[in-house]
Amino acid sequence: MLGRDKVLLRESCSYAEAVFSSAAMISVLPHWMRPILGPVLSHGAQKHLAVLRENLLPCVKERLSKLTDEPEPEVRVDMSHMR
């Protein structure tokens, strides 16, 4: 279960903290410097995001495969009244 996965919870919290701290640092930079230093300052958030993707992707794929494996409901259309 995803809600009880310690790694996922830790990385989710760390990612959120890294995003807010890097956003705060980027916001005080001059506008012309943001595209240059923004990727460097947000590197920590990118590392956490990579771990999250690594842990979430198998679960997402599994759930999507369960959705596509379900049989389609049979639909019947009565067109006898259209004669």
Image (cartoon, helix red, strand yellow):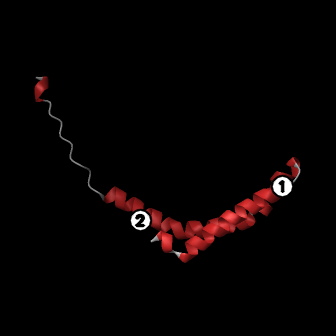
The residue lying at 86 percent from left, 47 percent from top is 31
Can you tell which quarter of the image residue 48 is in? bottom right
Can you tell which quarter of the image residue 62 is in? bottom left
Lateral position of residue 50 relative to residue 35, left or right: left
Question: Can you say whether 53 is above or below 67 in the image?
Answer: below
Can you tell which quarter of the image residue 40 is in? bottom right
Q: From the image, which quarter does the N terminus lie in?
A: bottom left
Q: Circles 2 and 1: CB distance less than 8 Å?
A: no
Q: Amino acid at mark 2?
A: Glu
Q: Which residue is mark 2?
A: 62
The residue lying toward the viewer, choosing from 4 and 36, is 4
Question: Can you say whether 49 is above or below 81 in the image?
Answer: below
Question: Callout 1: helix, strand or loop?
Answer: helix
Q: From the image, which quarter does the C terminus lie in?
A: top left
Determine the CA span between mark 2 and mark 1. Answer: 39 Å
Question: Can you say whether 28 is above or below 13 in the image?
Answer: above
Lateral position of residue 73 relative to residue 48, left or right: left
Q: Position of residue 4 (x, y in %)?
A: 49, 74
The residue lying at 29 percent from left, 57 percent from top is 70
Q: Which mark is residue 36?
A: 1
The residue lying at 10 percent from left, 29 percent from top is 80
The residue lying at 11 percent from left, 26 percent from top is 81
Q: Position of residue 43 (x, y in %)?
A: 74, 65
Q: Position of residue 78 (x, y in %)?
A: 14, 34
Mark 2 crowdedness (10 Å alpha carbons): few <14, some 14-19, many ≥20: few
Q: Amino acid at mark 1?
A: Ile
Q: Position of residue 34 (x, y in %)?
A: 83, 52
Question: Callout 2: helix, strand or loop?
Answer: helix
Instruction: Tell me how many marks there are.
Output: 2
